[in-house]
Amino acid sequence: MDFELSAELQELRDTVRRLAQDKVKPRAREIDKSGEYPADLFEAFRQAGLLGLCIPEEYGGSGAGILGLSLAIEEVAKYSNAAALMLLLTRLPTGPVMIAGSEDQKHRYLPGITSGDQRAAFGLSEPQAGSDVMGMRTRAVPDPHRPGGWVLTGTKCWMSGVAEADWYTVFAKTADPQSRAHDSVTAFIVERRWSGVEVGRRDHKMGVRGVDTGELLLEDVAVPSENVIGEVGGFRLAMLGLNSMRPVVAARGIGLAEGALMYATEYVKERDAFGKTIADFQGIQWEIAKCAVDIEAARLLTYRAAWLADQGKFSKEWVPYLSAAKYHATELAVRASGLAVQLLGAAGYMEDHPTEQWYRDAKQLTIVEGTSQVQLGLVARGVLDGDLWWD
Ligand SMILES: Cc1cc2nc3c(=O)[nH]c(=O)nc-3n(C[C@H](O)[C@H](O)[C@H](O)COP(=O)(O)OP(=O)(O)OC[C@H]3O[C@@H](n4cnc5c(N)ncnc54)[C@H](O)[C@@H]3O)c2cc1C
């Protein structure tokens, strides 16, 4: 067992740490306030070669894998979860393409993500179908005019980066819309410029502002056969894509928790009360210690999950390890940001400090890409099935 990062990954982490301190930290509050997409940070990430971390070299990426991407996100999320989300979006919609896409699809769609010429988003959720994805109503019917082609109609919602995206990975029912069978759902690549594709309502969010979230409207969108990802009826691909993303979302949580705890620790070392500093009180020290232990536990779970995903271990038997990381790290983000507000007292509740923003941002993480309850269900299934077992 080796707990050391490779020299390349250590260098990557150090580079992103500096970039996050120099460029992301000073912009974080402003992005949250204005809600405007931080094009300057996208450009900084592009110049630093961070948009292709998880994309293999043959498609223009750097091949740093899920672990490389998670390390970068951890650094950026110390200051801004919106900026971290921009990096996450280089993997969420491209994941299914990398896992099951054709060579043609990989060559057509991945290099643009790496170079920053294109952006993508991921459409699984619908207003009536979040956790219960099989309840989706977006429909794909065979195109009478193009052999092998499909015509998509429906509404996807809460889609991160929907307005900025040039193409979308979209899931739709290719069989009976009432069917709950997994082979009734198929993944497609849909381009924004195609007829019938529109961005609908944009959501007003309590946190992670700056990267938009909203609806994608599809009305009789003709999708050619070469844009079907994997097999028709390959819903399993959605789950494989999401399983492999668990460490990436978890990294947003550990970065946020680290940023919040470091900030609050600096504060309590300076804040006087009762003739001492607040940091001198054992009650405060134990809270800091518990949070620090929690962060280290989450980092170990997350790095192991990323390591598993990079080895292609994200099928059912590995799910409990991947889901445990997402569950633990994102719940930790909520606890740590709450603690940071508490340690600053009234100051932590005011906009003068970033603590109130971390508190608002953290909550998103326990909802997206499978809620905490869904992750607990997956871990439980793993234990009940003996995939997570200790003898
Ligand atoms: C900021 C943001 C960005 C998002 N970005 C994207 C995106 O880019 N693409 C995309 O496709 N989706 C996206 N989503 C949607 C997200 O994936 C869903 O919100 C999530 O899957 C939960 O679905 P829901 O909101 O419909 O909640 P529901 O499924 O309605 O769940 C409501 C509550 O019930 C609980 N619950 C549901 N089922 C069970 C169960 N079986 N057992 C116990 N508890 C249960 C849930 O845990 C939750 O607490 C985003 C959401 C947010 C908030």
Image: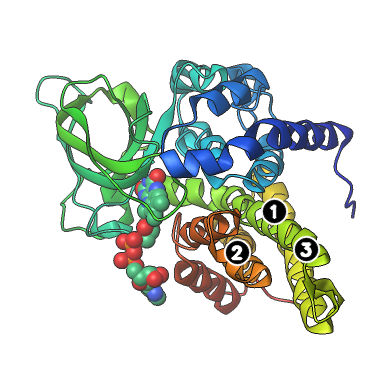
Instruction: Of the two numbered discs 1 and 3 on the same chain, state the one appearing first in sequence.
Output: 1
Q: Is residue 327 visible?
A: no
| Residue occupying image coordinates x 33% and y 25% | 227
Is the residue marked by circle 2 packed among few (<14), some (14-19), or many (20+) residues within 10 Å? many
- The answer to whether residue 381 is left or right of residue 145 is right
Residue under circle 1?
259
Few, some or many residues within 10 Å of mark 1 (<14, 14–19, 20+): many
Q: Which residue is mark 3?
A: 265
Q: Nearer the viewer, residue 211 or 72?
A: 211
The nearer-to-camera label among 1 and 3 is 3
Q: Earlier in the sequence, mark 1 or mark 2?
A: 1
Q: Closer to the camera, 9 or 255?
A: 255
Q: CA distance from mark 1 to mark 3?
A: 10 Å
Residue to which mark 2 is pinned: 348
Quadrant including the N terminus:
bottom right
- Mark 3 vs mark 2, foreground winner is 2
Amino acid type indicated by mark 3? Thr
Horizontal and vertical percent position of residue 7: 89, 34
